[in-house]
Image (spheres, rainbow, N blue to C red):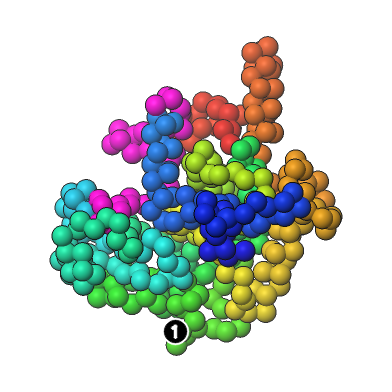
Amino acid sequence: MSVQTIRNVFSVETGYRLSDDQIVNHFPNHYELTRKDLMVKNIKRYRKELEKEGSPLAEKDENGKYLYLDFVPVTYMLPADYNLFVEEFRKSPSSTWIMKPCGKAQGKGIFLINKLSQIKKWSRDSKTSSFVSQSNKEAYVISLYINNPLLIGGRKFDLRLYVLVSTYRPLRCYMYKLGFCRFCTVKYTPSTSELDNMFVHLTNVAIQKHGEDYNHIHGGKWTVNNLRLYLESTRGKEVTSKLFDEIHWIIVQSLKAVAPVMNNDKHCFECYGYDIIIDDKLKPWLIEVNASPSLTSSTANDRILKYNLINDTLNIAVPNGEIPDCKWNKSPPKEVLGNYEILYDEELAQGDGADRELRSRSGQSLGSRGIRSRDSGRTVLTTWK
């Protein structure tokens, strides 16, 4: 079903009851994760809750920055947070910001700004000059632009990773091994003279395919495996492993952030397209999550990948190709996972945690279950694996 159809099926007025042998490929309110503004709102709320609980995950450095939960660029909603944004903008007036409409995809309606006057002009042009109409259809988010992206061959790229969620409570999610990088066709420059050249800044294939230098054979795409090999050979194995570990971690945290508000309907599963940007310090940033990642193919390899993605997704959602049954426990056997691997299983993690607590209380060693925390040298438990 498309997201529009899902809305109709689950709507109070027009909706209807799905029978036990019907399952659908979106959660009713997936937009809590897949709308740019709501994702940020939920992650901010999640951080505050962890902080209140005194969770070590919400630890901050001396400047008040989250040590582990700082994985989304500073973001404000417009027009609602306009004054907050202005305050932040004035702190570092030389930075670049990126404006995106909340509910659009494929790079539509996106532009970069580095002057307040540009926002005022946008506001006049979109007829919301007083910034009052908060219910205005065209809500935007404005985020600090990551102007130090990791470049390969001088070009900016982002990662598209596929994550399948079969249930939110308990959370069970899978990572597809065959994600890919999407490259820009034009070399990157942070120069302000190129701020409106989207071939430099936006990796969306929908935009890049119109560029003069777009290559129809490889489509400006690289497999995640190639990226991994490249980074291992240029930056070393250890930092590469740490990077991928962090990417997996921020994906799990983003899902945990929305799990409490997600309508965990038993008829639903969902395959998300995660967009991640890596900066030149090898820090991953979560840019956005797509509810309907493109399943059309731009190259021959792409076609094979998307075919396998759909096939593997259905094998997990409907094991053995049998008639679906929404009452089953949603833990398929390892053999049917195909190119998916389990990313996080809350039930297993909780069982594991209780088990571990018993062992550590009874004075047995933690063995390989402990990991060293990032810098303190003390051993801490992996909180998410």
Decide: few, some or many residues near mark 1? Use Cα within 10 Å; few <14, some 14-19, many ≥20. Answer: some
Q: Is residue 113 above or below residue 318?
A: below
Q: Picture quarter containing residue 345? A: top right
The structure residue drawn at horizontal position 58% and vertical position 55%, both measured from the top left corner, is 15
> Which sits in the foreground, 46 or 191?
46
Residue found 21% across the figure and 72% down from its top: 125
Farthest residue, direction bottom: 212
What count of labels does the image hold? 1
Q: Is residue 81 left or right of residue 6?
A: left
In the figure, 113 relative to 49: above or below?
below
Q: Residue at x 64, y 29 (%)?
A: 350
Left or right side of 37 for 15: right
* Residue 118 seen in the current view: no
The residue where tag 1 is placed is 211
The structure residue drawn at horizontal position 83% and vertical position 58%, both measured from the top left corner, is 321
Quadrant of image for the N terminus: bottom right
Instruction: Pinpoint residue 189: horizontal percent, then vertical percent.
Output: 33, 71
Q: Which amino acid does the dot numbered 1 rest on? A: Gly
Residue 91 shown in magenta:
no
Across and down, in percent, residue 22 comes to 72, 55
Q: Secondary structure at mark 1?
A: loop
Residue found at the far front of this picture: 13
Q: Describe residue 194's horizontal placement relative to residue 177 as left or right.
A: left
Range of magenta residues: 52-81
Q: Is residue 213 above or below residue 79?
A: below
Q: Quadrant of the C terminus?
A: top right
Image location of residue 335, percent across then percent down: 82, 51
